[in-house]
Image (cartoon, rainbow, N blue to C red):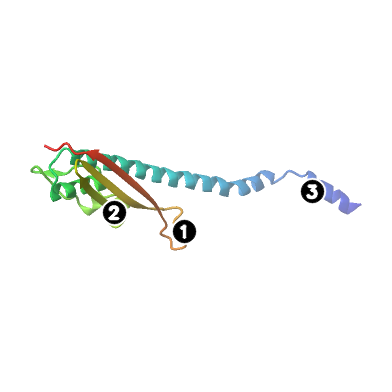
Amino acid sequence: MLQRRNLESFQACQRGAVTIEFVMTIPLFLAALAFAFEFGRFFLAHQSTVNNVRSAARYLSRVEITDANFDCAKYIVRTGRMDFGDGVCAAPDEGDYPDYLAPANADIAIARNAQRIFIRTDVRFPLTIFGFVDGSGRSNLRFAVQEDVRWVGM
């Protein structure tokens, strides 16, 4: 009879229930928060790359097709801005590249076919929070951005 009363009082007791619920839900909340942060970084990187590729395509559609202008378009894809010194596109410093568009992480291909210009970049976006996914600590998400425009020239 004493055991039965202790068992009933244990089942009816509410002390510590909130703490247990908190301890059980906090990992799920933190995982959702980390996922939202990582997705936001990825979405920002993708959108910045799309804007940079469009700017480079617009630039190439309005200038003469030379190797120097192709290099300038690659700088535009990597940095998002045109650095001109004395009317010539100047190479930006290594610190001007975002980490996901650095030369080691992004391959940029530019081609011209008759009156069309094609720009394609393949990016390996490094994960910061979920970098442990593949076991190496350096997991990447890959995405590609492509733009083609008509060449107007000068």
Q: Which mark is residue 132?
A: 1
Q: Quadrant of the C terminus?
A: top left
In percent of width and height, residue 130 lies at 46, 54
In percent of width and height, residue 73 lies at 20, 46
Query: Would you name the residue on which mark 3 appears?
Result: 10
Camera-side residue: 147 or 40? 147
Q: Earlier in the sequence, mark 1 or mark 3?
A: 3
Disc 3 on helix, strand or loop?
A: helix
Q: Amino acid at mark 3?
A: Phe
Q: Amino acid at mark 2?
A: Asp
In the displayed structure image, the side of residue 1 where residue 83 appears, left or right: left
Q: Which mark is residue 107?
A: 2
Q: Marks 2 and 1: which is nearer the front?
A: 2
Toward the left, the furthest residue is: 86
x 42%, y 43%: residue: 40
Residue 49 in which image quadrant? top left
